[in-house]
Amino acid sequence: MNDIALSLDTVWMLLAAMLVFWMQPGFALCEAGFTRGKNTANILFKNFVDFMFGSLLFWFVGFGFMFGSDGAGFIGMPNWGDLSFYHGDLPVEGFLMFETVFCATSATIVSGAMAERTKFSMYVIYSAVISLLIYPVEGHWTWGGGWLCNEAADSFMMQTFGAVFHDFAGSAVVHSVGGVLALIGATALGARRGKYANDGSSRAIPGHSLTLAALGVFILWLGWFGFNPGSQLAASGEVNRTAICHVLLTTNLAAAAGGVATMFVTWLKYGKPSFSLMLNGVLAGLVGITAGCDLVSPVGAVAIGLVCGIVLVYSIEFIDHVLHIDDPVGASSVHGVSGILGTLLTGLLSTSGGTLYGGGWEFFGAQCFGILVIGLWAASCGFALFYGIKRIHGLRVNARIEDEGLDVYEHGETCYN
């Protein structure tokens, strides 16, 4: 690779990393808008915690856990801040930054589902564990060159399915993991006070600012243009420039289709189009397309967005009204359900090996197996983490703090004075 091409690829990777970092304020504003004003400082603080602790822990050991040992074994080796073990075409410091922003995203997803009643001290602990261990391990199995993505003829995946697991930018690796952890965490934590009546019916607890939520979604939509196209990790040459343009198009189409689908479903179901659910529909489309944005056609991208946007409405309703799990921002559905759907639909709609394109069931089988393994890892870790904290120290603030707001009691300050 010539020096100019390598420099161009490096700049592209760094610009994409900056766009993905910009998703952090997007998540923060979206979560703050969907929740009550008395907890806004707490919510914004938690999003800073995710990135601060994630940056330090992933640099110190998480990067080694994910990319060490050349993909061999259950987990890589801790690098203790030493990056010399990694050998790639792009500068390792830049690649570390690119991977760091993805790690922080996975931790941030959990925040919304557990908002408005979690002890800040316990949030710091489980955010750190996600960045330190949960995300790097399953990342090692996939993007770290591990067994789920090992294309060697004698590998487990090739011998079992004749295909390897594919997740281009993180529907499974980032979003489904965050969504599953969010669901387990919200279950362990319990519903907000007043959320469910004595007869079990669900009561809406409106957020304090749809304006903030909408701004957050716009920022996330923009950030996804780094999240997905940036995962090509190169821009030089015809193959790469064509690929990033294709990924940008499929990403945008899925987002638009997800929002449109949710808008019309809520219009038909409730008599009026729901703006708040439409915002989540856009995110559902973005999450769903992330696994196969490089493999599906524009028509396939629209199909993924439509499916995720439609399912989102019923998933949020099921988790709330049937399971009685209180997820204030719908993170379990947006990231968990849509991440799983997008991963599976990639196996059907990929123009290269997809079942609906004459590729048989091998690739789809690999996708099913991969998302099952990753989901079980996230669920088992989440159960041990959240119920362990709950038993040892307690996850939840007391009733008075919850009623009056976490801002004053947890931080001694408020966002609105």
Image (spheres, rainbow, N blue to C red):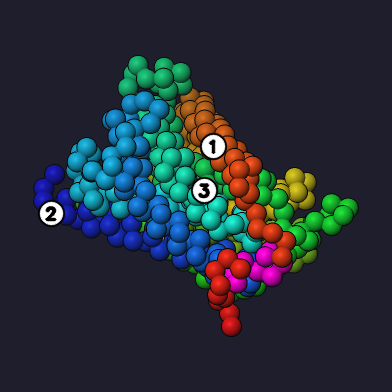
Q: What secondary structure is found at the residue carrying circle 1?
A: helix
Distance (Cα) linking label 2 and label 3: 42 Å
Q: Quadrant of residue 166?
A: top left
Q: Using the image, tell me which numbered label, if any, was put on residue 381.
A: 1
Q: Tag 2: residue type?
A: Ile
Q: Quadrant of residue 142?
A: top left
Labels 2 and 1 touching (C-beta < 8 A): no
Identify the mark nearer the N-term, 1 or 3: 3
Identify the mark nearer the N-term, 2 or 1: 2
- Against 358, residue 93 (above or below) is below
175 within the magenta span: no
Name the image quarter holding the C terminus.
bottom right
- Against 345, residue 262 (above or below) is below
Seen in the image, is 214 located left or right of residue 80? right
Which residue is under mark 3? 126
Q: Residue at x 22, y 53 (%)?
A: 10
Q: Tag 3: residue type?
A: Tyr
